[in-house]
Amino acid sequence: MSFMEVPIFPLSTVLAPGGPLLLRIFEPRYLDMIGKCLRTDSGFGVSLIQEGTESGTAKVHLLGTLAKIADWYQYDDGVLGITAIGLQRYRLHGTQRKTDGLMVGQVTLLPREVPQALPEQYAYLAEVVKRVMGQMGPQYDLIEQDYESATWIGFRLLEVLPLSDEQKQFGLEIIDPIERLEMVARVVDKMGVER
């Protein structure tokens, strides 16, 4: 089995394929990583932290998402800001820490989900996503929208619903998009969101 080596960004958040991620970058190891990604047009891995912290050392979940930088900018305080977009899920097989503290992982990319149309019984979930999208900020202007896709709707609801990080990680790890829709539909229904 051949592995791909990618820098890993351990975060206290879950990134789903097709979703945006806003980051403020100030640690030297991540500034160097972002600089290299921009120069080589390459991506980095986003993995949810299991133990530890973003600024220290961290143990991460084995399933994460490869991200690509879509935009970058400098904040008024001089900190670098980026918007990354989730591309494809990966499985992490091992990590090593570079001398600057950057985690590098050996990963295999998981196959993309087979496109499936949004089933009729979940059409109301597309309406929920449409209502929420307008309130989500400019980072959502950078992503492709596909209100007909079971995968796309499921992943967007994972991002916007009030779920714990562990629940979001569980949703990310679900392989069947219809099963993921069932999961998010239960949450939406429990919240009493208007259909």
Image: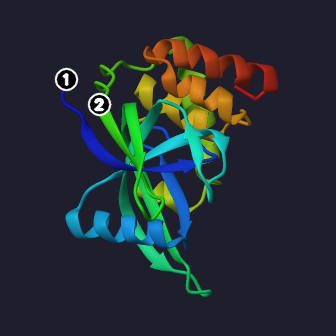
Q: Is residue 143 visible?
A: no
Q: Is mark 1 on a helix, strand or loop?
A: loop
Q: Where is residue 170 in the image (x, y as percent from the top left)?
A: 59, 23
Q: Position of residue 85 (x, y in %)?
A: 41, 51
* Image vertical order of residue 152 relative to residue 173, above or below: below
Q: Contact (CB < 8 A) between labels 2 and 1?
A: yes
Of the image marks 2 and 1, the number of the one nearer the N terminus: 1
Q: Which residue is drawn at 53% across and 37% down?
A: 156
In the rendered structure, which amino acid carries the disc numbered 2?
A: Thr
| Residue 108, numbered label | 2
Looking at the picture, tell me which residue is in the foreground, 41 or 195.
Answer: 41
Q: Which residue is the site of mark 1?
A: 1
Q: Residues within 10 Å of mark 2 (few under 14, many from 20)?
A: some
Q: Which residue is drawn at 38% across and 66% down?
A: 34
- The answer to whether residue 66 is left or right of residue 74 is left
Q: Which residue is drawn at 44% across and 32% down?
A: 152
Q: Quadrant of residue 95?
A: top left
Q: Nearer the viewer, mark 2 or mark 1?
A: 1
* Image vertical order of residue 48 relative to residue 136, above or below: above
